Image (spheres, rainbow, N blue to C red):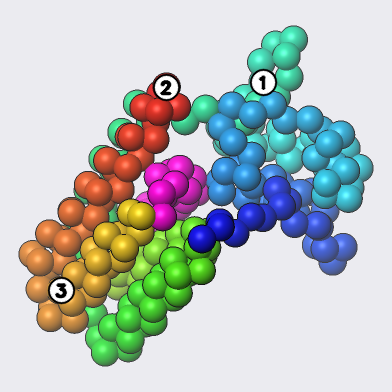
Amino acid sequence: MEMVQSPRFERIPRTESLTDAVYEAIKEAILTLRIAPGEKLNVAEIAFELGTSSTPVREALNRLMNEGFVRKVPYRGLFVSEIDPVGVQQLLEVRSILEMEAVSRAAVRFGPQDVEVGARLIRKMLKAHGKGDIHAYIETSLNFHRLFIRRCGNEIMVNLLENLTDRIRQLAFLAVRNREEIPLFIEDYEKMLKALKAHDPEEAKRALREHLGRVGESLYSVLERRGG
């Protein structure tokens, strides 16, 4: 089945703050790999695609440079930052520590409504996979993680993981490059949901550990092929 292709940018609605809208559009294109790591950024080209002047594009790129998503190379221009393997390892370690604790805590708080939401998200993942829509699958899978994270009962933990969301999204789009892996990922979510429904913290942690390990293997495989 042919993959669903998307344009790099959405046109900017005139009702939004222009600079913020341009920033969000470029950032979204970077996080979802519509602009690839290492790709050179042409201000005039981006402005044309977005239907804006160059000024808000430059302002947005400066903001993204401060956040580490864009880097400036002297005499060459602006580029999307490469994925740093050391940074990836550190991020995955922190994510694992926080999410393992979150899913364990969520298991004792998960109610019938949470179970229904989780089941609905899994159905959406299956539907997205059936359509070959990797973007929809990834966004829905991240919402499953948010579901149990927000039920952990620790707002600081929730906020810490929310602060990692952009980086995690970018790595998710990098890791899920092969549609053949998605059914295994969905099986992991089904195991997690079953454990959460049964209020079984240890089984929930086991299912999440397997899932994060599987995603990590896929991600490192991609980085090796990219020469990272």
Residue, disc 1: 72
Give the alpha-carbon distance from disc 2 to disc 3, as whole Å: 38 Å
- Residue on which the image places disc 2: 227
The percent coordinates of residue 51 (x first, y second) are 88, 50
Name the residue type under label 3: Ala
81 within the magenta span: no
Residue at 45% over, 59% down: 138
The answer to whether residue 157 shows anywhere in this view is: no
Sequence-wise, which precedes: disc 2 or disc 3? 3
Residue at 30% in and 48% down? 215
Asked if disc 2 and disc 3 are in contact, CB closer than 8 Å, the reply is no
Looking at the image, do the residues carrying marks 3 and 1 touch, with CB atoms under 8 Å apart?
no
Q: Is residue 80 above or below residue 115?
A: above
* Mark 2 or mark 1: whose residue is earlier in sequence: 1
Q: Residue at x 31, y 63 (%)?
A: 183
Q: CA distance from mark 2 to mark 1?
A: 21 Å
Q: Main secondary structure of the magenta part?
A: helix
